[in-house]
Amino acid sequence: MSRKENRIYDTVDIMSAPVDNELIQDLGDHVFAIDTLMGGYTGITSSYLIASDKPALIETGSALCAPVVIQALEHLGISRSDLATIVVTHIHLDHAGGVGDIAKAFPNAEIVVHERGARHLADPTKLVASAYRVFGDRMDTFFGPLLASDPARIKALGARDRIDLGAGRHLESFHNPGHASHHVALVDSITGDLYTGDAAGVYVPETSSIRPATPPPDFDFDLAINSIEAMKAVRPKRLLFSHFGPVDDVDIIFGQSIEQLNYWVEWVTDAHLNGLDLDHAVLLAQEKDRANNSEFFANRAVADKFEELSSTEAQVQGIWRWLETKS
């Protein structure tokens, strides 16, 4: 079965996809997960609404997913004047690509991002051009262009910061690089939920397993491990993955995150030290991955779906680039 056949919706049909309770999950304490239908798939990318006194959207999904997220917010009773904050864990287009569209639809919302990513939301020219170089034609079918945001509406987060949710509730943010230099983690003061972005990897709910998130150009193994340890240190009650969904087994999943990072870096390092080229390193990683994660690959549809989001080639390229910068 091809990847296209595994899609629930064609990307051109996402705008008209029905937004109902199948795409929205009530997680309690006024927290809702929204399936963005990224790439036409269900179960691949989450946005989250905290429907507090000052409602906040965490992660927008890609630009092509913005209509789904906007409809979901309206379905949840958030009017165009209600949304107070749009927060992104980092500026990769599967997390922040819809910022411009959603900010336009909700004109009172402040846009919150780490200070290293703020200028790219105000002027996304370089970010979008770089994405086109990496993804080519897939940009038009999987992501779409990031629209510029009004600089006056952007709040830049520092190393540690706080986002007001009203009525004494807030998000604590801390810089969490390794996956990306502009990555932050977010902790809800009421629930203890930790919004992981990509810093803990990609969670696959069908197999309760972790996939790597090591793409170029910013991946740094040492920073990535430090960031997982920093997330563990805040002792979260639950992990809310952007890819994909809520996880209660916090310690188990953090352990898997560290384990998978070590595996993948070991595989690519061995290939690098043994003089293999990048293409052969990808083949080696694919072979090792299939041997180590047989349950994940047993479901072809799931494996294909997550490979399209987080390809082996991209993960190896990120680790390879990190090794080259260390040489």
Image: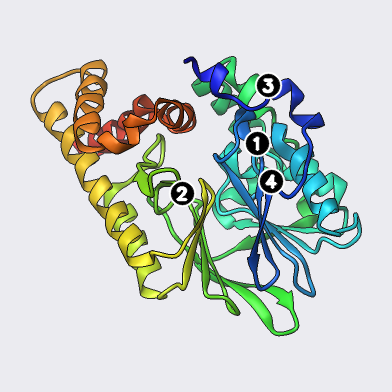
Q: Quadrant of residue 303?
A: top left
Instruction: Give the secondary structure at mark 1.
Output: loop
Q: Nearer the viewer, mark 1 or mark 4?
A: 4
Name the N-terminal-most of marks 1 and 2: 1
Identify the residue shown where x is 26% and y is 16%. Answer: 279
**Coordinates of residue 177 in the picture (x, y in percent):** 42, 54
Residue holding disc 4? 22
Q: Can residue 218 be seen in this view?
A: yes
Residue on which disc 2 sits: 198
**Which of marks 4 and 1 precedes in the sequence?**
4
Observer able to see residue 226: no
**Hey, which quadrant is residue 147 in on the image?**
top right
Q: Mark 1 is on which residue type?
A: Leu
Real-space CA distance between mark 1 and mark 2, rounded to the nearest whole angstrom? 18 Å
Q: Is mark 2 on a helix, strand or loop?
A: loop
Q: Is 273 displayed left or right of 27 in the figure?
A: left
For the rendered model, the colour scheme is rainbow
Q: How crowded is mark 4: few (under 14 residues within 10 Å), some or many (20 or more)?
A: few
The answer to whether the residue labelled 1 contacts the one labelled 2, judged by CB atoms less than 8 Å apart, is no
Identify the residue at image location x=26%, y=23%: 282
- Say which element carries label 4: loop
- Residue that badge 3 annotates: 10
At 15% from the left edge and 27% from the top edge, which residue is drawn?
271
Q: Nearest to the eye among marks 1 and 2: give it.
A: 1
Vertical placement of residue 236 versus 324, above or below: below
Which quadrant does the C terminus fall into? Answer: top left
